[in-house]
Amino acid sequence: MDSSSEFHASSEFQDSLPISSDALLSQLTAWDLPFSYHEHAPLRTVDQSKQVRAGFLSAEEGGGHIKNLFLRDKKKQNYLVALQEDAALDLKQLADLLGSGRLSFGSADRLLEHLGVRPGAVTPLSMINGCHHGVTLYLDKSIMQCQMIYMHPLVNDRTIGMTPDAVKRFLKNVGCDANILDIDRLTGDQE
């Protein structure tokens, strides 16, 4: 990957997406779904996002800082799995839990085709595209218990915060069923 492609997931390139970040934000407002809005340098990794936390609730304060995995099984079924940013996950165990075959990460081309985003901007909000392309969404139950869930609005130089209730309403509005997973069951972190 050349260094310039690092920024292709930023808002500078949002007009090349099926739905722009600006259009998504306008739709959230039209649906009366409240959100906080933050701009920052393009972020591609969890480690990078940890450097940009001013104005966000910490995990201890109820902030849901997430990572998103776009996965595909051998039957070409696509999955989006959102979980706590520091959660360790074994893909074989996840495949068993989902009842799928072996899972692997989806390519950048499939990501754009099925979720309408580029690497570094994967988000539950991309189900505005994904639910129409056969992507199955799984959310870790622990993020749905947070006060605020932080995610990219289809680009990686913006982050919005939404309550779990607002996320559920968004998913309902786009016609997406959210499957809730207990990732702690896989990792042995049960309390």
Image (cartoon, rainbow, N blue to C red):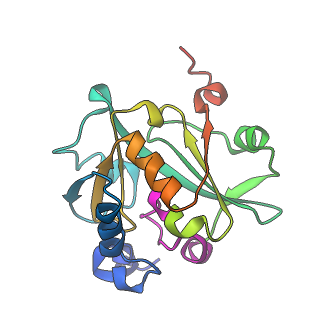
The region drawn magenta spans 108-126
Tell me: 57 left or right of 142.
left
Snapshot quadrant of residue 92: top right
Q: Check the image and name the residue furthest to the left.
A: 54
Residue 163 image point, x, y percent: 35, 41
Residue 70 image point, x, y percent: 59, 59
In this rendering, the answer to whether 151 lies above or below 85 is below
Tell me: 27 left or right of 1.
left
Which residue shows up at 32% across the image and 30% down it? Answer: 62
Closest to the observer, 44 or 128? 128
Residue 153 image point, x, y percent: 36, 63
Closest to the observer, 174 or 17? 174
Which residue shows up at 34% across the image and 82% down it? Answer: 13
Closest to the observer, 113 or 173? 173
In this rendering, the answer to whether 92 lies above or below 137 is above
**Quick check: is 109 in the magenta stretch?**
yes
Tell me: 64 left or right of 136.
left
**Quick check: is 4 in the magenta stretch?**
no
Q: How many marks?
A: 0
Tell me: 131 left or right of 83.
right
Q: Check the image and name the residue furthest to the top.
A: 191
Q: Check the image and name the residue furthest to the bottom.
A: 16
Which residue shows up at 60% across the image and 33% down it? Answer: 183
Residue 140 image point, x, y percent: 55, 38
Which residue shows up at 52% across the image and 62% down it? Answer: 174
